[in-house]
Amino acid sequence: MIWSGEPARRSNSLLEKQPNPGHRIADLKLPFSVFLALRYLKPKRTFVSIITLISMFGVMLGVTVLIVVISVMTGFDRELRQKVVDWDAHILVGTEDVLRNWRDLSVKIRNTPGVVGTAPYVQGPVIVEFRSQRLAPMIRGIDPAEEEKVVPLKRFIKKGALDLEGESAVLGVELARKLRIDVGDKLTIYSPGNLGEILDGIKELEKSKGENERKAVDKLRDVVLPKELTVTGIFETGHYLHDSEFLLVPIFVGQELYGLGDALHGLTVKTDDPYGADRVKRSIEQFLEPPEYAQTWIDMNSQFFEAVRLERTVMFFLLFFIVVVAAFGIMNTLITVTVQKTRDIGIMKAIGANIWQIVCVFLGQGIIVGLFGTLAGLGSGMALVRYRNEFSRWLASTAHIEVFPKQVYQFSEIPAVVVPGDVAIICIGAFLICCIFAFLPAYRAARLDPVTALRYE
């Protein structure tokens, strides 16, 4: 009896020391479904765990790319609008030919409700030459005192000053770089505005003889003779198109180059609200006579804004398919797991687990993968947005890849604006897609017949 009792006591003591799996689950204070989902996700260096990591990386990559692209496109749209508003007037009043009654018109426009200021301008293409280099930028003839009421040009001056007294000019920084010109240099300008006069002079020269020929040559020389301007300043707006294509000159120089006399090409108008310019435009149109017209800054750049908006929408839907592909990876992983765990499913159903408990086991796996992938994508996306310009410069210097060429996109740096609503839609949408794709194999697993599952080999 003594001998027979020893094993009993010994076995009882072993049972007391043996950890109870049920106690372990209770100690963790995790629901049955969550505990098993975490257990199945534990890496075992199998093909399934590799697919799980790839699926999680796919979700992260999709969320990262979406956040970066949408933030950059939003920033591009807002920066483009801001650059246009900073350089161009809110409303442009012009005509198909030249504006002659501009002084009376300017008084009427100034008295229009919502108008802050007006300024005269002359604008058109010219040919500039410096040390045998020739380019064809746009000149903008302005009155600096009046123009400051419409566009604050002084804050864009990078070198020199906005000095347009006498025969002088102020260039964009990219135009100055192309010409290799600096403040104090002399710039030669040829205007295509007198092309008709040149052709008429040549015809007159062909018909003339003797004294008349000399007079015709002198007249033609006066027409062809270029303007020589001193560069007094260099400006930088950050908008590549403005910095590379514009040359500011005094308004009388613009009038001389285009042979306008006292006439203008138009008037620029500043309103109290840039986005309310359309309302002010309708008020101005009441005293305009055809062929005079008025255009807002949105009308003049509508194609750019519409193209950016359309591209942003298309990119969002196209890139969202990266998340969908990653969700297919999650679904494939769970299908493989449910096949491997068929006997486990049968045991769970045999001991009383209901359909939704089993669904939650495998759905929990998909939710965990989707959640961690989304959070990782959110973190990497925000970091990439924060250091986008540094990353772009690193790519340009090491791999010689221009991610955002300023000649194409017209910005010196990559703009970006993080809109919390867009980020929330991306993250919630990605997570929900992962959950939906995870639910399908989870529900299929829960519908297995327990007898068939227990017989599975």
Image (cartoon, helix red, strand yellow):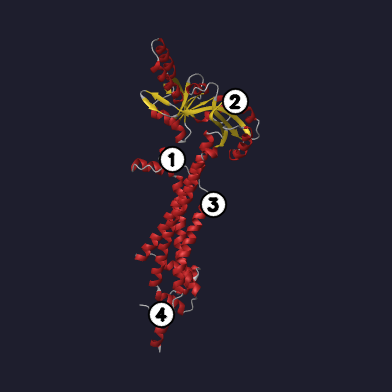
Check residue 101 in the rendering and tell me which mark sits there, or answer none: 2
**Of labels 4 and 2, the one closer to you:** 2
Q: How many marks?
A: 4
Is residue 200 among the parts visible in the rendering? yes
**Which comes before the other along the chain, label 4 or label 2?**
2
Cα gap from disc 4 to disc 3, whole angstroms: 48 Å
What is the secondary structure assignment of the residue under circle 2?
Answer: loop
State the image quarter where residue 120 is shown: top right
Q: Is residue 44 visible?
A: no
Q: Are marks 2 and 1 in contact (CB under 8 Å)?
A: no
Q: Earlier in the sequence, mark 3 or mark 2?
A: 2
Q: How would you rate the neighbour count of disc 2 (Cα within 10 Å): few for under 14, some for 14-19, many for 20 or more?
A: few
Between disc 4 and disc 1, whose residue precedes? Answer: 1
Q: How far apart, in angstroms, are the residues tagged by discs 3 and 1?
A: 26 Å
Task: Tell me the mark number nearer the camera, choosing from 2 and 1.
Answer: 2
Q: Which of marks 3 and 4 precedes in the sequence?
A: 3
Residue type at mark 2 is Asn
Q: CA distance from mark 4 to mark 1?
A: 62 Å
Foreground of the two, 126 or 99: 99
Quadrant placement of the C terminus:
bottom left
Name the N-terminal-most of marks 3 and 1. Answer: 1
- Viewer-nearest of discs 3 and 1: 1
Label 4 sits on residue: 452
Q: What mark, if any, has residue 409 been given in the picture? A: 1
Residue 126: image location, x then y, percent: 44, 27
Q: Residues within 10 Å of mark 4 (few under 14, many from 20)?
A: few
Q: Which residue is mark 3?
A: 421
**Three-letter code for the amino acid on which mark 3 is drawn:** Gly
SS state under label 1: helix
Task: State the image coordinates of residue 39 (x, y, percent, origin top left).
Answer: 42, 68
